Image (spheres, rainbow, N blue to C red):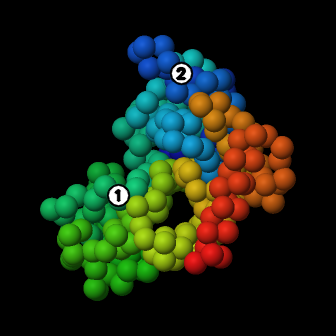
Amino acid sequence: MTSLSDGFQGGYALEFRATTYRLPSGAALVSGLNLSVARGETLVLLGRSGSGKTTTLKLINRLLEPTEGEILITGRPSLSLDPIQLRRGIGYVIQDAGLFPHWTVARNVGLVPRLERWPEEKIHARVREMLSLVGLPPEEFAERRPSELSGGQKQRVGVARALAADPPILLMDEPFGALDPITRADLQREFRALALRLRKTIVFVTHDVREALFLGTRIALLDQGRLVGVYAPAEFLKATEPEIHAFAASLEFGRAHEGAQ
């Protein structure tokens, strides 16, 4: 398959065109989604549990396939692309990192380059580069097993693995959701700096409005499988939709609770 980067001469990185996903029962988890993601932006999918965020993410790399409509990836219909090659060309980070427990950190990070038959010397150099990029000195961490890592370190390895083959698109499904507040804040700051440096196209799922406001170039708000709207962070809390008011109220409650402690 031609590299996904080859479609980046112009246009959007991702486009949902009237995309719907239904369960076999007929229930729609995503309904009539029209959404474009620009090259190099971090688009945050924000919504409550069950709003369709993770379903939308899985439609991008064909872990699920649309019932209606289509998705364009760098200008090409996703269903025209080989699903295995498509997934190798898109980085994917999930909440628990999804590392192979019996593999070393180095082998986990080098997974996709090895599947793509990179020369071993190139893989070794890339693994060291990626570990350094996410703040894990390779001489200290490369030969560790996941069981020897903290939660934050596992997530850093997950990010390194997702970036190892230099994909133009990165999908992140609540990657920091299971971490303690201090580690989570540290990783959010590190991730924002990394996103600005690398300029990948990132789709980031969260239900945390503060995380969305901090990390997103734009915020796409989903409610019961439908797109409420797309907003710049500075515009989000000023919008008038009831679902935004609900998220704004949760933000104010959190601030008040922190102030009372």
* Quadrant (top left/top right/bottom left/bottom right) for the N terminus: top left
In the rendered image, the vertical position of residue 92 relative to residue 133, given as above or below: above
Which mark is first along the chain, 2 or 1?
A: 2
Q: Seen from this angle, which residue lies furthest left?
A: 102
Residue at label 2?
28
Residue at the spot 55% in from the left edge and 52% down from the top edge = 206
Is 84 placed left or right of 143 in the picture? right
- Across and down, in percent, residue 196 comes to 65, 69
- Across and down, in percent, residue 232 comes to 78, 54
Q: Splitting the image into 4 quarters, where does residue 47 fall?
A: top right
Residue at the spot 35% in from the left edge and 58% down from the top edge = 96
Residue at the spot 73% in from the left edge and 46% down from the top edge = 244
In the rendered image, the vertical position of residue 172 relative to residue 81, given as above or below: below
Q: Splitting the image into 4 quarters, where does residue 74 fall?
A: top right
Residue flagged by tag 1: what amino acid is it? Asp
In the rendered image, the vertical position of residue 257 relative to residue 44, given as above or below: below
Q: Secondary structure at mark 2?
A: strand
Q: Nearer the viewer, residue 84 or 157?
A: 157
Q: Secondary structure at mark 1?
A: loop
Asked whether disc 1 touches disc 2, contact meaning CB atoms under 8 Å apart, the reply is no
Mark 1 is surrounded, within 10 Å at the Cα level, by few (under 14), some (14 to 19) or many (20 or more) other residues, namely some
Residue at label 1?
96
